[in-house]
Amino acid sequence: MTHVTIVGGGPGGYEAALVASRLGAEVTLIERDGIGGSTVLTDCVPSKTLIATSDLLTEVSSAAELGVQVPTSVRADLATVDARVLRLAQAQSTDIAHRLAASNVVMIAGTATIESAGTVVVETADGQQRVDTDAILVATGAHPRVSPDAQPDGERILTWEQVYALQELPEHMIVVGSGVTGAEFASAYNGLGAAVTLVSSRDRVLPGEDVDAANVIEDVFTRRGMTVMGNSRMASVERTDDGVLVTLTDGRTVSGSHCLLALGSIPNTEGLGLEALGMVLDDHGFIKVDRVSRTSVRGIYAAGDCTGVLMLASVAAQQGRIAMSHLLGDAVHPLDLGKVSSNVFTSPEIATVGMSQKQVEESDLQIDMAMLPLASNARAKMQGVHDGFVKIFSRRGMGVVVGGVVVGPKASELIHALSIAVSASLTVDQVADAFTVYPSMSGSVAEAARRLHPLV
C-alpha cells in the first residue's frame, strides 16, 4: 500500500487526501492551524459569510423600488455577524474533519518539516513525530502580505484574517488594495453601512478583471457612496488617537477609523526545508509545478496557493486531486487554466470563465463577442436589477464558446452554463437551443449566445 503524506489541510490538501484514500492509499494529513486551512477558517468561507449579510442589506436598501417599505434603521449587528462567521467557519472545518476521519485519513496537528521525499518531521504539542512516506504533497497555502510601513495590530490596522474580531461596525474603513480581496471587502463594508474609502494604486478597481465588468463595479461603488481613489499608492499606515492615518506616496493623507490591508499574499513555504531538498521556487517563494502538480523533486507534489498557479480554492482542490490521480495511477487530466471559472464576490458579482477580453485581443484567433445588458432582462426588471451584463466569446465561423463574463446578482451561479460550454466545447447554437425558464436571468445567457449564431 502506498503511503501518502500531505502537508496542509486546506482545499488542496483535504481534497487530495479524500482522492488518495479512495484510490487505496494510506494517507496522513498534517495541519498546523486547523482542518480546512485558511480558506475555511480565516479567508474564503468567513469572507463570503460576511458578504452574505452585506448582500442582504443591499437588497433591503432597494426594497422601496419593489413597493416594500422598510424601517430606515435596518442595520447589521457586527458582533453577531462576526460571531456567526466564525461559528460557520468552525462548523465547516469540523465537517471536513469528519469526512477525512470517515475515509481513514490520519490527521496530525503540528508543524511539518520535510527532511526528504520519504520523511516528514512534525512538531506536535506532545513532541516530535517522524512520518515515513512514499510520496508527499505540499499544500501549505499562503498568508496576507504586509508592509514594514503598515504593520497590522489586529485592532485598527487589519489584515483580512483579523477583521472578524471587530465588535462594532467601523465608522470609516479605509481599504488599501483594489484587487479581488480589497474590492470584496470594500463592497461588503459599504453594504453593511460603513463609510468606505478604497485606495487603488491603479487607474481603476479590479485591474486584473474584465474592463467592462470592472467599470460597472466602480460605477456602483461610487453611486453607493464609496470613495474610490485611483492612481493612489500607499506609503504608510499609522495609528492615531482615535483611528488611523494613511499616507500616500504623493503626500496626501486619508483619515479613518480602521484600515484593511489587501496587499496580496505570500506563500507559506519558508521553514519547510524545501531549499535543502533542491526544490525550485520562483523569486517570490512559490513552488514551481507542472500541470500534474509535480515539483522539481521526485516524489513530492504541490497544490494550492503555495504554487501561485491561480489562487482559487477550486484550483487548489483540482491540483490536489490531479496530483493523487497521477501518483496512484488513475486517469489524469492535466490542469487546464483555460477552463477555470472564477468569481469576484462584490455586489454585483463578477464571474468569468475561459478566455478573457484581454486574451481575445492579444490572440491571433478570430473571435466574435456578444454583450447583453441585464437591464433588458424581464426578470431583472422585476427584481429591480439595473447593473450587469452577459458577455460571450466564440470562435468565428465555428461558433464554439471559448469564454464568458457575467456581471450581476448571483453571477457565480449563472456562469455555470458557460463553464460547461467552455469545458465541453459547445457551440453558441447548442447553448441557445437549450431551454431556459421565462422569465429568468439565465435567459440572458441564451439570448447572448443566440446573437452569436454563425452566419453561413
Image (cartoon, rainbow, N blue to C red):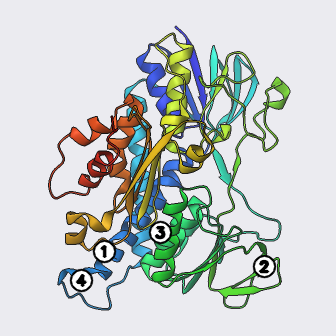
Q: Quadrant of residue 56?
A: bottom left
Rendered location of residue 49, percent (x, y): 41, 61
Extreme residue in the left direction = 438
Q: Quadrant of the image for the C terminus?
A: top left
Distance from disc 1 to disc 3, alpha carbons, whole Å, reads: 18 Å
Q: Nearer the viewer, residue 129 or 354?
A: 354
Type of amino acid under label 4 = Glu
Rendered location of residue 132, percent (x, y): 66, 17
Distance from disc 4 to disc 3, alpha carbons, whole Å, reads: 21 Å
The disc, 1 or 2, on the residue closer to the chain's N-terminal end is 1
Q: Are marks 3 and 2 in contact (CB under 8 Å)?
A: no
At label 2, counting other C-alpha atoms closer than 10 Å, the crowd grade (few under 14, some 14-19, many 20 or more) is: some
Q: Are marks 4 and 3 in contact (CB under 8 Å)?
A: no
Q: Nearer the viewer, mark 2 or mark 4?
A: 4
Q: Is residue 163 above or below residue 352?
A: below
Distance from disc 3 to disc 2, alpha carbons, whole Å, reads: 26 Å
- Left or right, 282 with reference to 66: right
Q: Is residue 3 above or below residue 142?
A: above
Rendered location of residue 219, percent (x, y): 49, 75
- The residue where tag 1 is placed is 59
Q: Nearer the viewer, mark 4 or mark 3?
A: 3
Q: Nearer the viewer, mark 1 or mark 3?
A: 3
Q: Nearer the viewer, mark 1 or mark 4?
A: 4
Residue at 70%, 45% in the rendered image: 267
- The residue where tag 3 is placed is 216
Q: Secondary structure at mark 3?
A: helix
Label disc, if present, on residue 65 of the rendered structure: 4
Distance from disc 1 to disc 4, alpha carbons, whole Å, reads: 10 Å
Distance from disc 1 to disc 2, alpha carbons, whole Å, reads: 34 Å
Q: Secondary structure at mark 2?
A: strand
Residue 106 visible, this angle: no
Residue 17 visible, this angle: yes
